[in-house]
């Protein structure tokens, strides 16, 4: 086994035991990144920074070393990294190199992590297939025919890099499923924490009441380790919760006897592939065999979640993206003689924003406009409150976690959906958006392969602030499923 194929937990033990140096581990990842160019996962490689950080980690080894000392990670291009291009995969931020570090990357570096570079993603995190990026498509390392498959989105580069062993773990962000859907499509683990558990400071905003950063890893244990380093209160983020961060790894006891697992009847969708239905049934059996009690629950407002999400998220996006005007940073259009400031705004945004971002900004501006605000945005906010209440009632009735499919299908081919009806693409988020609307933690765990040989995941949804319990349930599911398949190397 090459060093880059290790999990974070395995690498941590090998580093602590002196069997491996951080420089050797980092070099193995940098070599894999070079070979992995066809995946288009890493878009800004930072080998010099990585090797400097690895040498510092080797010098620091011992009792004072952080939880991630010497662990090489990939960072989604949405996180501001000091002196390193942070473009959110958009031409409008071309050339932008922040003078500051996001809170999440600061915390990771304090824990001793090594940054290998920045990862591909959908532009401003708007997409479910990583096809809206200014860097071009990220490609799923799983391949079963002559097609190039999507790694999912928006954290497609993160998912592809982890699944292909280009890094040991990666950061992602999740606004409507952007950690969990790509994790399911690539056979890895991805957790979206409770809203407010991880600081949003220094992360380029898409929809501020929905965005949440989280880890994408090769195992549930790795997710627990990485989340522990990322989480915590941040006074710079007014939505960050001042709640102690438990030891997530210590919570992985593997004991869920007597726990109640809810199965929402509304997630049995018309036209759901038989393989997804069978996988879900298998997940229920595995948790029951581990001693959990399986109970049917109702989340009646689930059917309104997608329309509510696709009103609220674009509304917040149109507000957040108003700051990209060509004045302060990033791209500015060339102006003709006689052009005024309004012409500059219009030309800059037309050149800088891609089609999907333009579509969502226009939807958002429309639903916030006078005469439509109450009909769309206010109504969507009320539906959101009802969706949250559905979950609150289920948890109040004693449910500890909720089991659902993660995605409505396995990974599809690049180009198969992007140019078709955009609503068909939005349906990819059908199982994940409720979690963001309700501010809950959710995790995707790889559980099996479909008939074509592509990975499928199941989603577990937890109580607010109970990532520890959620990770333990996921750990049990992971162990029972025994998913060890990896993509065959073709790149």
Image: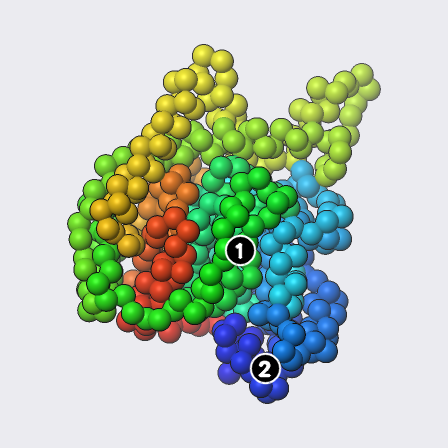
Q: Would you name the residue on which mark 1 appears?
A: 231
* 348 versus 214 height, above or below: above
- Residue visible at 72% across and 49% down in the picture: 100
* 442 versus 310 height, above or below: below
Can you see residue 258?
A: yes
Neighbourhood count class around disc 1 (C-alpha, 10 Å): few under 14, some 14–19, many 20 upward? many
Foreground residue among 137 and 269 = 269
Foreground residue among 57 and 145 = 57
Neighbourhood count class around disc 2 (C-alpha, 10 Å): few under 14, some 14–19, many 20 upward? some
The percent position of residue 387, horizontal first and vertical second, equals 32, 36
In the image, taking residue 360 as reference, residue 63 lies left or right, namely right
The percent position of residue 192, horizontal first and vertical second, equals 44, 52
In the image, taking residue 78 as reference, residue 339 lies left or right, namely right
Query: Nearer the N terminus, badge 1 or badge 2?
Result: 2
- Residue visible at 78% across and 25% down in the picture: 335
In the image, taking residue 392 as reference, residue 104 lies left or right, namely right
Q: Quadrant of residue 109?
A: bottom right
- Residue visible at 56% across and 50% down in the picture: 233
* 445 versus 306 height, above or below: below
Question: Marks 1 and 2: CB-CB under 8 Å?
Answer: no
Foreground residue among 220 and 336 = 220
Mark 1 vs mark 2, CA separation in Å: 23 Å
Tell me the tag on residue 16: 2
Can you see residue 88?
A: no
């Amino acid at each position: 086994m090459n060093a880059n194929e290790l999990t974070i937990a395995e690498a941590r033990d090998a580093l602590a035991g002196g069997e491996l140096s951080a420089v050797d581990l980092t070099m193995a990842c940098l070599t894999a990144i070079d070979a992995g160019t066809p995946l288009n996962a890493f878009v800004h490689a930072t080998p010099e920074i990585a090797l400097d950080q690895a040498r510092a980690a080797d010098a620091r080894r011992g009792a004072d070393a952080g939880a991630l000392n010497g662990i090489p990670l990939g960072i989604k291009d949405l996180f501001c990294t000091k002196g390193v291009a942070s473009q959110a995969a958009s031409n409008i931020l071309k050339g932008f190199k922040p003078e500051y570090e996001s809170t999440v990357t600061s915390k990771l570096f304090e824990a001793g992590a090594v940054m290998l570079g920045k990862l591909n993603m959908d532009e401003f995190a708007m997409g479910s297939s990583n096809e809206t990026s200014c860097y071009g498509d990220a490609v799923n390392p799983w391949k079963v025919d002559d097609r190039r498959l999507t790694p999912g989105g928006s954290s497609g580069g993160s998912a592809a890099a982890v699944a292909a062993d280009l890094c040991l773990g990666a950061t992602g962000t999740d606004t409507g499923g952007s950690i969990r859907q790509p994790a399911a499509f690539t056979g890895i683990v991805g957790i979206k924490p409770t809203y407010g558990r991880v600081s949003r400071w220094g992360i380029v905003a898409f929809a501020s009441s929905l965005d949440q950063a989280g880890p994408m890893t090769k195992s549930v244990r790795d997710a627990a380790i990485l989340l522990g380093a990322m989480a915590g209160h941040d006074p710079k983020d007014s939505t960050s919760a001042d709640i102690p961060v438990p030891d997530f790894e210590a919570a992985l006891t593997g004991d869920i006897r007597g726990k109640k697992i809810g199965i929402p009847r509304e997630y049995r969708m018309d036209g759901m592939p038989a393989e997804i239905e069978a996988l879900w049934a298998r997940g229920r059996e595995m948790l029951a065999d581990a001693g959990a009690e399986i109970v049917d629950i109702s989340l009646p407002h689930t059917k309104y979640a997608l329309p509510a999400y696709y009103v609220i998220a674009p509304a917040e996006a149109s507000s957040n993206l108003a700051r990209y005007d060509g004045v302060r940073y990033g791209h500015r259009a060339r102006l003709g003689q006689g052009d005024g400031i309004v012409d500059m705004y219009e030309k800059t945004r037309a050149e800088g924003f891609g089609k999907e971002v333009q579509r969502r900004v226009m939807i958002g501006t429309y639903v916030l406009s006078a005469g439509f605000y109450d009909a769309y945005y206010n109504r969507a906010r009320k539906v959101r409150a009802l969706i949250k209440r559905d979950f609150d009632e289920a948890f109040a009735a004693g449910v500890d976690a909720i089991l659902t499919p993660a995605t409505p299908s396995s990974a599809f081919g690049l180009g198969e959906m992007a140019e078709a009806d955009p609503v068909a693409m939005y349906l990819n988020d059908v199982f994940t958006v409720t979690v963001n609307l309700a501010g809950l933690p959710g995790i995707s765990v790889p559980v099996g392969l479909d008939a074509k040989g592509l990975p499928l995941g199941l989603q577990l949804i937890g109580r607010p602030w109970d990532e520890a319990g959620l990770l333990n349930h996921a750990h049990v599911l992971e162990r029972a499923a025994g998913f060890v398949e990896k993509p065959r190397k073709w790149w």
